[in-house]
Amino acid sequence: MLWIILAVLIALGLFAVYAFNRLRRVDIGAQEALGGIDVQLTRRADLIPNLVNTVKGYAEHEKGVFETVTAARAGAANAAKSGTVAEKAAAEATLDHAIIDVLAVAEAYPDLRASANFQALQTELSDTENKISFARQYYNDAVSTLNRLVRTIPWLLFAGVAGVGAREFYAAPDGQQVPPAVTF
């Protein structure tokens, strides 16, 4: 009888260690996925000065647009460093609007649209937007897995001990569910 009790206690102890480690691994995975969004947002923010400088040569009188882009880029960089998921989404929306404004300025300058530098930057921005989309989806998948674990038995019994809780999903800010229309 003593051996049975001892075997059950050992099995419970091993399961507790497994549950703790699994919850921590999934939480770290969600944290890393959020970092992936930060990497892509930073990449996009780093491309913006090149886009602005390319357009600026053609549109010196559009100074307000460039100041807005600079402020939006700084906000996105700050949110990527230390913001919450909601702050990151809001900063991303502001930067999206600023990029659209720069592209609208470019629309007024046919020579600029034909420039190889401008076309290369547009390609990079498009590629970056795709990577941001993928990073958002990857993060939401990781959060879904984590949230499912911390809200179901037996994992929820160990969530507090592991210091793991549900995370919020990365949702596009209002007005960002539909891609912006930019025409040339």
Image (spheres, rainbow, N blue to C red):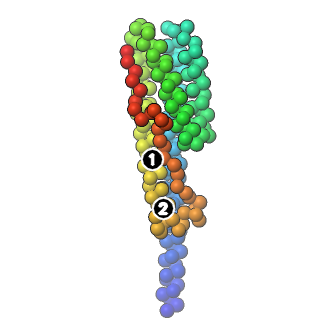
**What percent of the width, then of the height, locates residue 67?**
59, 18
**What percent of the width, then of the height, locates residue 109?**
44, 8
Residue 35 is at least partly visible in this image: yes
Quarter of the view holding residue 46? top right
* Residue occupying image coordinates x 52% and y 17%: 52
* Residue occupying image coordinates x 39% and y 11%: 114
Q: Which mark is residue 2?
A: none
Per the image, the residue denoted by label 2 is 151
Quadrant containing the C terminus is top left
**What percent of the width, then of the height, locates residue 58?**
49, 8
Identify which amino acid the numbered label 1 is placed on: Asn
**What percent of the width, then of the height, locates residue 125?**
44, 26
Q: Going by the image, does 178 lie left or right of 5?
A: left
Identify which amino acid the numbered label 2 is placed on: Arg
* Residue occupying image coordinates x 42% and y 49%: 141
Report how many numbered discs are placed on residues in the image: 2
Compared to residue 161, the image places residue 72 above or below, namely above
Local crowd size for mark 2, using a 10 Å CA cut-off: few (<14), some (14–19), many (≥20): some
Local crowd size for mark 1, using a 10 Å CA cut-off: few (<14), some (14–19), many (≥20): many
Q: Are marks 1 and 2 in contact (CB under 8 Å)?
A: no
Quarter of the view holding residue 106? top left
* Mark 1 or 2, nearer chain start: 1
- State the SS at label 2: loop
Question: Label 1 vs label 2: CA separation?
Answer: 16 Å
- State the SS at label 1: helix
* Residue occupying image coordinates x 57% and y 21%: 68
Per the image, the residue denoted by label 1 is 140
Quarter of the view holding residue 88? top right
Residue 131 is at least partly visible in this image: no
Q: Residue furthest front?
A: 174
